[in-house]
């Protein structure tokens, strides 16, 4: 009995590990020439036999495989009856649209109904007394005075808590940058504008970005060929990267586990006690 339970537990743990650390591979190849887009987008999980989805940009068709079974495009978007009708040549039967409301109301009747429903809002406005105006002016306070009694404002003013929150945010956002791992990034662009000044600026920005990537030792192949004196755009690009479910879980776990709960709770209680003391006075 215990051996069966242990075997089931081990099997579930293996499935969990495969789900967490199984890599998703994303590949995209796109080309744009003469105002036409062509290319493919591929998404795979661990092995193409388990899960594979491919989208053809030029034809607009999706081809998918799940555990070796091929899913046709009709299976993804159409019902069985619609697919059978399309294959047999009969058009898909659709329900007739609902009857539209009766029309033909004269313009004169519309104007009469509109004039009857109009209400003069100026007569509904009540006069405001001078005492009320003075009370409203006294009630208006500056923003620092309004925030002075708020707990959040009291906590933000604390330098130690503010430093912990800033460090926590920095580490959290740095963990987000490790969600995906690029395997390939290639781009061959040929572009230009009618104004050569703007084309030169774009080429300068592109060169700066490319040099920054080279300094970070990125194996990315990027090239831009400027075309002056006319609007022109052609490009060929290829992107490939991998990720896992565990990479998405790491930032969430870090945000939950390393938040400064103790210091935040202490400041919250201090602000609450100060607010209660002011109310008693």
Image (tube, rainbow, N blue to C red):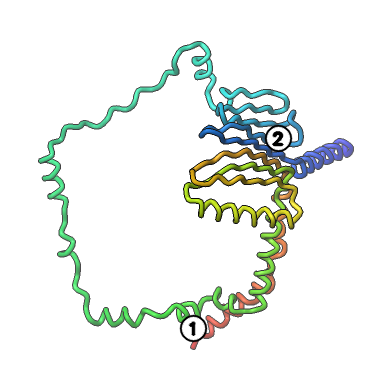
Q: Nearer the viewer, residue 214 or 242?
A: 214
Residue that label 2 marks? 44
Q: Nearer the viewer, residue 246 or 266?
A: 246
Residue that label 1 marks? 279
Choose top left, top right, bottom left or bottom right for residue 187: top right
Judged left or right of residue 140, residue 62 is: right
Of the two numbered discs 1 and 2 in the rendering, the one whose residue sits closer to the viewer: 2
Q: Is residue 244 something one can see in this rendering?
A: no
Residue 239, how many percent across, how many down?
A: 67, 41
Judged left or right of residue 151, residue 115 is: left
Q: Is residue 235 something one can see in this rendering?
A: yes
Q: How many marks?
A: 2
Choose top left, top right, bottom left or bottom right for residue 143: bottom left
| Name of the residue lying farthest toward the top | 88
Q: Which mark is residue 138?
A: none
If you read the primary sequence from the N terminus, does the residue marked by circle 1 or circle 2 appear first?
2
The residue drawn where x is 56% and y is 34% is: 33
Residue 251, how many percent across, how many down?
A: 70, 56
Residue 185, how many percent across, how many down?
A: 69, 44
Element type at mark 2:
strand
Q: In the rendered view, tell whether residue 272 sits above or below residue 191.
A: below
Q: In the rendered view, tell whether residue 82 sits above or below residue 281.
A: above
| Name of the residue lying farthest toward the right | 3
The quarter of the picture where the N terminus appears is: top right
The residue drawn where x is 28% and y is 82% is: 134
Element type at mark 1:
helix
Label 1 to label 2: alpha-carbon separation: 62 Å
The residue drawn where x is 67% and y is 74% is: 163
Q: Nearer the viewer, residue 153 or 187?
A: 187
């Amino acid at each position: 009995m215990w051996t069966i339970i242990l075997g089931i537990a081990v099997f579930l743990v293996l499935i969990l590990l495969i789900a967490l650390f199984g890599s998703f591979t994303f590949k995209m190849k796109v080309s744009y020439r003469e105002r036409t887009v062509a290319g493919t987008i591929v998404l795979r999980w661990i092995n193409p036999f388990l899960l594979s989805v491919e989208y053809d940009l030029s034809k607009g068709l999706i081809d998918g495989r799940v555990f070796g079974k091929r899913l046709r495009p009709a299976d993804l978007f159409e019902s069985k009856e619609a697919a059978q009708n399309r294959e047999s040549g009969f058009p898909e039967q659709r329900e007739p649209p609902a009857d539209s409301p009766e029309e033909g109301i004269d313009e004169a009747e519309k104007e009469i109904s509109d004039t009857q429903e109009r209400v003069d809002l100026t007569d509904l406005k009540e006069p405001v007394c001078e005492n009320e105006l003075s009370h409203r002016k006294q009630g208006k306070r500056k923003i620092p005075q309004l925030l002075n009694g708020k707990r959040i404002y009291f906590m933000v003013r604390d330098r130690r808590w503010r430093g912990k929150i800033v460090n926590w945010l920095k580490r959290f956002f740095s963990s987000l940058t490790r969600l995906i791992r690029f395997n390939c990034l290639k781009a061959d662009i040929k572009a230009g504008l009618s104004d050569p000044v703007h084309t030169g600026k774009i080429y300068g920005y592109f060169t700066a970005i490319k040099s920054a990537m080279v300094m970070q030792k990125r194996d990315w192949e990027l090239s831009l060929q400027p075309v002056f004196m006319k609007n022109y755009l052609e490009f060929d690009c290829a992107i490939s990267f991998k990720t896992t479910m565990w990479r998405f879980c790491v930032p969430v776990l870090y945000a939950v586990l390393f938040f400064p709960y103790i210091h935040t709770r202490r400041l919250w209680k201090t602000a609450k006690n100060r607010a209660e003391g002011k109310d008693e006075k």
